[in-house]
Image: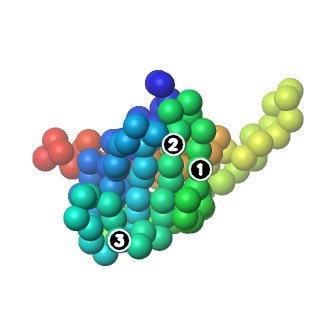
């Protein structure tokens, strides 16, 4: 499956202490907010556990999308970046819908129709810039 959000989650799992990823035959699992890994690689008592099934279904085992967005924003601030989160309404012929922009001061910004994608992609910009240093 070539899903941009899935790719962004996989990328975030490579950042130190951001997300932890476990792949299994039944899909992929992403964890956040845990203290340590248990033998076998599973996190101990995570605050957030998102499972993605093989056909793309999203199952929140623990936590939810807003909790993951807040966790990732906090992770970015802990990394020393100044973040700004903005929501505005976009109007067009199909109606109105929210538009989310996450800016990292001095790095760049990413705008998307969902807050998780905007957050992950803006943090990816910051991580890429950090890796170039």
Residue 8 in which image quadrant:
top left
Are the residues tagged 2 and 1 within 8 Å (C-beta)? yes
Residue at 40 percent of width and 37 percent of height: 25
Give the x, y percent position of residue 20: 33, 55
Q: Which residue is mark 1?
A: 59
Q: CA distance from mark 3 to mark 1?
A: 19 Å
Identify the coloring.
rainbow
Mark 1 neighbour density, 10 Å: few (under 14) some (14–19) many (20 or more): few
Vertical arrangement, residue 101 with respect to residue 90, above or below: below
Q: Please state the horizontal and vertical placement of residue 130, each as a whole percent of the image.
A: 21, 49
Image coordinates of residue 78 in percent, x first then y, are 32, 70
Q: Nearer the viewer, residue 12 or 31?
A: 31
- Badge 2 is on which residue? 52
Where disc 3 sits, the SS reads loop
Locate residue 84, reporting x and y percent. Answer: 50, 60
Q: Which is nearer the N-term, disc 3 or disc 2?
A: 3
Determine which residue is flagged by label 3.
Answer: 44
Camera-nearest residue between 9 and 22: 22
């Amino acid at each position: 499956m070539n899903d941009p959000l899935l790719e962004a989650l996989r990328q975030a799992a490579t950042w130190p202490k951001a997300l932890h990823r476990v792949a299994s035959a039944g899909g992929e699992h992403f964890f956040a907010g845990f203290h340590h890994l248990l033998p076998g690689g599973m996190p101990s008592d995570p605050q957030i556990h998102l499972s993605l099934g093989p056909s793309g279904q999203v199952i929140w085992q623990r936590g939810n999308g807003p909790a993951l967005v807040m966790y990732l924003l906090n992770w970015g601030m802990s990394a020393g970046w100044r973040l700004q989160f903005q929501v505005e309404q976009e109007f067009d012929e199909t109606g109105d819908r929210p538009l989310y922009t996450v800016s990292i001061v001095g790095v760049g910004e990413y705008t998307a129709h969902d807050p998780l994608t905007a957050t992950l992609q803006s943090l990816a910009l910051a991580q890429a810039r950090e890796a170039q240093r």
